[in-house]
Amino acid sequence: MTAGKPAYYITTPIYYVNDDPHIGHAYTTLACDVLARFKRLDGFNVCFLTGTDEHGQKVEKSAAVAGVDPQSFTDRVSQNFRDLSQLLNFSNDDFIRTTEERHKVSCQALWRKLVAAGDIYLGSYAGWYAVRDEAYYAESELTDGPNGAKIAPSGAECEWVEEESYFFRLSSWGERLQKFYDDNPDFILPPSRRNEVVSFVKGGLKDLSISRTTFSWGIPVPDAPGHIMYVWLDALTNYITAVGFPDEQSESFRTFWPADVHMVGKDILRFHAVYWPAFLMAAGVAPPKRVYAHGWWTIEGEKMSKSLRNALVPAELVATYGLDQVRYFLLREVPFGNDGDFSHKAMVGRMNYDLANQFGNLAQRVLSMIAKNCDGRVPQPGELEAADEALLRAATALLQELRDEFDRQQFHGALTKTWEVVGAANRFIDHAAPWTLKKTDPARMATVLYVLADTIRRLAILCQAVMPDAMAAMLGQLSVDPAARDFAALESRLVPGTALPAPQPIFPRFVEEEAPGVREGA
Ligand code: ME8
């Protein structure tokens, strides 16, 4: 049932298939997954897209190194990114590959629109190109590396390219882009990233080479034999392909475009916040509503790279710490937008303190007291005291606070606020001391346990987006009907007398000696 629901469209970058997925890729997709789940629970009709970027020189070269043709190579490596979705419990609605026919049709249609608008002309490119970044660089941006190599700001080595090329008239879009940024102050978040982009555009834009002729692994430019599209024009177009472009009248396009959020790493912000809206505006298609550029993960203080062999393998992390623990850590540890460092110590700290001690222990204490003292059934509350009402209200009021945080992609803020209520519930149980009431006032004990159980229910409902499996288990222990777990259910209450299963711990502690170490490799 999607009729009448507000739409929400969120995308990840499409990842290059030259690399095996590591924790950096997992991070971006995780952030999108959490937003998608949150919005679904909040009654939105969500489209959550991820996929793989399969054309271009970099992929062609990787295929050659692997000794296979590019199509077989991309078929194989793209599957690794699908497997990542399975492993990390990502709920993407679609997975796009740029080698699909629907995408070729879409790119060629966009190209024709740009030609019709007069924004494409034939010229020739002579300049620097970094295959690793699939990006052009001006001489002034480069530094000298060993053996006369020219190095881009990203660290990638550049090569000199001279070839006939079609150009996009980016230079004529500077003022319109600036007006667009002014009119849409939240188009680029976080604000520090916005400032970077605005000053880049103010500095003046050059026309952009958008076709290549010296290799062939790409989408053919219509009516221009020998030319294939620049891989970034091809890649960015995936966001409209997936919702039905070029059929702009299709139900999915009308429902989901413009996208609500393109989530990207800070490395690829310029492509999304400058080139992409310019292409779209030139083609007469609305630009997306937001590009959010998050920060960069390092591992134990070091840059992640294949050559350093320290790229954390998501499967190892999940095996060592547990899936929902990793999901929680990545979003809680670092303010979203900042750079972060993955360390075993920090991971274990979050796992043992926030999850096991604070939330897990709260649930465990309450559920085992109910099992022992209330015949394993949701207790019958008496009249609620002011403190009871306040705790329940705090848990329900969290919803609006979380909406505000999630709408600005502030995951750490959402989790911090949630844990304030977890803390309040722990203080409540310590203060109310139901283990003492058991002897002195069993009726009040029942009320206290009821209030706590319903608070845990509310917290678990609100945490489902971040930790779907663990919260499903917690809601199962409270016998909450799977059909009553969305945010509308925050208004309801546990039904006294409902039988509960025997309590099981939800969040295990990490015990050093027992752990198979990812640390040595990290
Ligand atoms: O750039 N920390 O693909 P890509 C955080 N195909 N995020 C990281 C990370 C790290 N250390 N390493 C990678 C491309 N990422 C293009 C995108 S979109 C139309 C085309 C994440 O495989 C982050 O989201 O190089 C970054 O932007 C993305 O992976 C780059 O993935």
Image: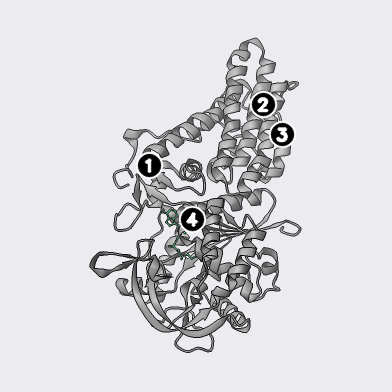
Where is residue 247 drawn, in percent x and y? 66, 75
The circle on residue 493 is 3
Which amino acid type is shown beneath numbered disc 1?
Ser
The answer to whether one can see residue 481 in this image is yes
The circle drawn on residue 67 is none
* CB at disc 1 and ligand 1 closer than 8 Å: no
- Kindly check if marks 2 and 3 are in contact, taking CB atoms under 8 A apart as contact: no
Q: Quadrant of the N terminus?
A: bottom right
| Residue furthest top in the image | 440
Mark 2 or 3 closer to N-term? 2
Residue 241 visible? The answer is no
Amino acid type, mark 2: Tyr
Q: Quadrant of residue 386?
A: top right
Circle 1 packing at 10 Å, graded few (<14), some (14-19), many (20+), is some
Q: Amino acid at mark 4?
A: Gln
Q: Position of residue 97 (x, y in %)?
A: 50, 69
Numbered circle sitting on residue 450: 2
Q: Nearest to the eye among marks 2 and 1: give it.
A: 1
Q: Residue at x 63, y 29 (%)?
A: 453
Residue found at the far left of this picture: 147
Residue to which mark 4 is pinned: 86
Going from the N terminus, do you reach mark 4 or mark 3 first?
4
What distance separates the C-alpha of mark 2 from that of mark 3?
Answer: 10 Å
Report, in whole angstroms, how far the alpha carbon at label 4 lies from the one at label 2: 37 Å
Vertical order, 160 against 175 (above or below): below
Instruction: Return the disc, 2 or 1, that comes first in the chain's sequence.
Output: 1
Q: How many angstroms separate mark 4 from mark 1 (CA)?
A: 24 Å
